[in-house]
Amino acid sequence: MKKYKSWQHFLLNEGGIKSTKTDAKLTPEIVIRAIDVYNRVIADFNSWLNGMGEMPVRSVKPVGSVSYAQRDLQDKENVIYGDVDYLVEFPLPASPEESYTEIRKKENLTKRKYRNLFAKFLVSSDATPEIDAEETLKGGADPFMVILEAHPGILVQVDTVITFPDYSDWMSVRYTPQRGLKGYTMGKLYKALGDVFPVTIGTEGIVARTRDGKLVSGRIRKGVELEVVSKNPKTFLVDLAKYITGDSEMLIHPDLSSHGGMTGEITLRKLAQGIRGFALTMETAGYMGAKDMLDKVATNYEQGLEEHRVRTTKRIQNKISQLQDGSKRDNLEKKIKEIDEINAKALKEVIPVLRA
């Protein structure tokens, strides 16, 4: 792959890249090859970091739909993935006395530092040969969206999903969807629950924003304090119930005891069952009627999927209007139909549980 002597030129801005050269179909076999190369990239990067006197990063696992690539290959599934995401843990020495806000500042500084270091690595003589530095760094794009040669003549983009030691276990679950469905179908359900209170169920676990002791939305900035409610994927729903009620000894409904978080096979139905148990627990505690809460979550989820459908469909239709190639237009029109099918399947998994 082609290398460059200077790295500063490529760090003009951050943002997504979409190389015209990465148009190969992301089959399970190609994805597995890309992941193997990416792991060598991280290993080579760590060797380079060691020479620079810097702390290493840690490859955690593929996330998103490609987390099932090995199983899909073994089962001979005819699946094409949209992208390749890989979770990587960055070092962050932290003190227990530091506030959440202070830790976030250190995380952002670490991200910037390692982004610059990685850009330098990409144009060094130590860079993994399969990296296409020109395509990776084109236009000042984020160097952690790596364009690499997964197979001779086949370029694939692998997106680095950054996490830190405290969140690795959480992110491994939070960023893994149900097999056969897109990641947004799971993310929208987490958001549908979080918006009821509101809390954020995102990359750092469950984070509450409070002002004067009351939960507030992300739209409010002044005088807001941030607090991590839970980053345990196995107990986060139980942890949230105890936080909202302020009762660490509260009575937990049997449904929540059985589905207090996410363990084993990750499915929408499991999360919906946990949310149902959560609502029943909150009703027992006198916080809110279970039916009202579940109706709100269900409505939020339906609206979230519909907003995604409308936004994505509009973007695809804009692309279609600019194409002359009939086969490419047909493929994009199929993607619109696939969104409807995915949303219908997701709703079938979730709504009957929430509105039982």
Image (spheres, helix red, strand yellow):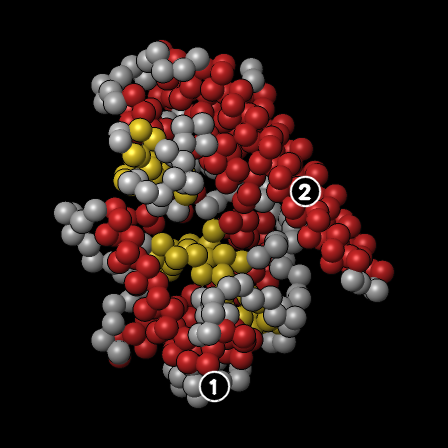
Read off the residue under disc 1. 4
On the image, the x and y values in percent for residue 90 come to: 32, 60
Q: Which quarter of the figure has residue 89?
A: bottom left
Instruction: Name the one closer to the observer, 104 or 221.
Output: 221
- Residue lying at the far front of the rendered structure: 222
Judged from the image, the secondary structure of the residue bearing numbered disc 1 is loop
State whether residue 210 appears in this view.
Answer: yes
Q: Residues within 10 Å of mark 2 (few under 14, many from 20)?
A: few
Instruction: Please report the residue visible at 82 percent of the width from the left and 60 percent of the height from the top.
Output: 327
Q: Is residue 69 above or below residue 209?
A: below
Instruction: Name the one closer to the observer, 59 or 286.
Output: 286
Read off the residue under disc 2. 310
Mark 2 vs mark 1: in front: 2
Residue type marked 1: Tyr
On the image, the x and y values in percent for residue 162 come to: 39, 57
On the image, the x and y values in percent for residue 261 come to: 38, 31
Q: Is residue 305 above or below residue 58?
A: above
Left or right: residue 151 compared with residue 51: right
N-terminal-most mark, 2 or 1: 1
How many numbered badges does the structure rendering display?
Answer: 2
Left or right: residue 8 compared with residue 311: left
Judged from the image, the secondary structure of the residue bearing numbered disc 2 is helix
Residue type marked 2: Val
Q: Residues within 10 Å of mark 1 (few under 14, many from 20)?
A: few
Q: Alpha carbon of mark 2 to alpha carbon of mark 1: how far?
A: 41 Å
Instruction: Please report the residue visible at 64 percent of the width from the left and 36 percent of the height from the top.
Output: 306
Instruction: Please report the residue visible at 61 percent of the width from the left and 70 percent of the height from the top.
Output: 19
On the image, the x and y values in percent for residue 272 come to: 49, 27
Q: Is residue 302 above or below residue 98?
A: above
Q: Which quarter of the figure has residue 201?
A: top left
Instruction: Please report the residue visible at 49 percent of the width from the left and 16 percent of the height from the top.
Output: 292
Q: Quadrant of the C terminus?
A: top right
